[in-house]
Image (cartoon, rainbow, N blue to C red):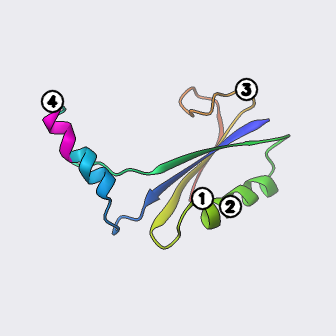
Amino acid sequence: MATILVHVMPKPEILDPQGKAVGAALPRLGFEGISQVRQGKRFEITVDGEVTDEVLANVRTAAETLLSNPVIEDVVQVKVVREGGCGCGGHGKAEKDLLA
């Protein structure tokens, strides 16, 4: 089994009210020097067996048609994490890191 991470973000030209609200709250809470926040989505997809090009293509298609709204969002990253990885992508276990 392996985990595939999919990151989806609003397109740059789309307003991000959640990110704007978080960005406005940070200085009030004492977090200075942050100029902008954009909020996106992260999906962790576990697949059985080896991650082949076909499996990855299927996940990419799912990301572009179901996990994101292509009118207002971009799939910005698809990352395959090796078997046994926690899925966070921060421990050097990434097999493939594929940008959209």
Q: Which residue is mark 1?
A: 67
Q: Residues within 10 Å of mark 4 (few under 14, many from 20)?
A: few
Nearest to viewer (mark 1 / mark 3): 1
**Quarter where residue 100 is shown:** bottom right
Of circles 4 and 3, the one toward us is: 4
The Cα–Cα distance between marks 2 and 3, rounded to whole angstroms, is: 23 Å
- Report the quarter where the N terminus lies: top right
Q: Residues within 10 Å of mark 2 (few under 14, many from 20)?
A: few
Query: Which residue is pictured at 23% across the width and 46% down the height?
Result: 23
Q: Amino acid at mark 3?
A: Gly
Q: Which residue in the protein does label 3 denote? A: 84
Q: Amino acid at mark 1?
A: Leu
Dots 2 and 4: beta carbons under 8 Å? no
Per the image, label 4 sits on a secondary structure element best described as loop
Mark with earlier residue (1, 4): 4
Q: CA distance from mark 1 to mark 2?
A: 6 Å
Q: Which mark is residue 40?
A: none
Q: CA distance from mark 1 to mark 4?
A: 34 Å
Q: CA distance from mark 2 to mark 4?
A: 40 Å
Specify the amino acid type for callout 2: Ala
Magenta residues span 24-30
Image marks 1 and 2: residues in contact by CB distance under 8 Å: yes
Viewer-nearest of labels 2 and 3? 2
Q: Residue tagged by mark 4?
A: 30
Residues at circles 1 and 4 in contact by the CB criterion of under 8 Å? no
Count neighbours of disc 1 (C-alpha within 10 A) and say few if under 14, some if 14 to 19, many if 20 or more: some
Q: Is residue 19 left or right of residue 54?
A: left
Q: Secondary structure at mark 3?
A: loop
Of marks 2 and 4, which one's residue comes earlier in the chain?
4
